[in-house]
Image: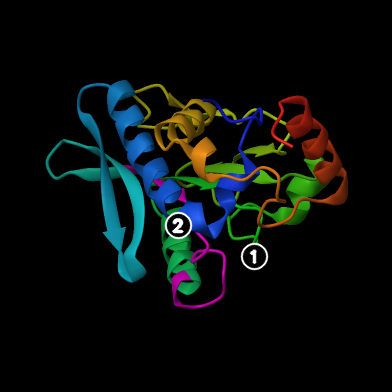
Amino acid sequence: MPSPFPGMDPYMENPDHWRGIHLSLIVCCFESLNRSLPPGFVARIEVREVRQRFVEIVELAVPERVITAIEILSPTNKTHGDGYAEYRRKQKEYIQSATHLLEIDLLRAGTHTVAASKSEIEALFGHWDYLVCLHRAQSGLHGDTWPRTIRQVLPQVLVPLTEAHPDVRLDLQSIVSRIYEAGALERSIDYTLPPIPALRPDDATWADALLQSQGLR
């Protein structure tokens, strides 16, 4: 059964579900990329301090070179503490390096952590709930952004490789929908209750009408 929401299901952000969903997002991105990457490149799941998992695309030439890092933010990344400090340190290293950085934030709660300026994105797009940012190697803080609200389908985002190879695409909506259905989340989510964290009042009204229309409230 698919999620009743057109894009990211806000009920998936509940801490009771998110740990497994976060790991599933990493695995699904890893699998999807390895189906799309050209010969000579491979995606791998890596772990750094404070048990933060992420995906790296490496070029298989000798020595192997990290081309792109893909970070799916967790509450640890967005809450001040050791995990946040470690993430920000690594983020700075990526931005100053020859490695592309793709940041995927599907959590409404917590501190704005992606490298792109919150005020600049708000000036361009207004309010958003979920955000994907791409910082190409050696471009500083300039990059592409894909902001989305809970009312919108998640984007297909670009994943850069080397100058000799075109970007590959990562379909986030397909990945999130696959995780929802594979995890049978409709069995464990109670849509009669408000999501955690709570929605903005206007989005709560919209969500209530959406869920009622599908017989879930």
Magenta stretch encompasses residue 69: yes
Height in image: 138 above or below 37? below
Magenta region: which residues?
A: 67-83
Where in the figure is residue 170, as x and y percent of width and height?
Answer: 45, 28
Q: Which residue is mark 1?
A: 111
**Looking at the image, which is closer to me, 165 or 87?**
87
Q: Are marks 2 and 1 in contact (CB under 8 Å)?
A: no
- Residue 95 horizontal/vertical position (percent): 47, 54
Which image quarter holds the C terminus?
top right
Local SS, label 1 = loop
Q: CA distance from mark 2 to mark 1?
A: 22 Å
Task: Give the answer, above or below, for where 96 lies relative to 76.
Answer: above
Q: Amino acid at mark 2?
A: Gln
14 with respect to 67 (left or right) = right
Taking the spot 50% from the left edge, 34% from the top edge, the residue there is 176
Residue ID at (68%, 57%): 197
Q: Amino acid type of disc 1? A: Thr
Which residue was labeled with disc 2? 96
Comparing labels 2 and 1, the label whose residue is closer to the camera: 1
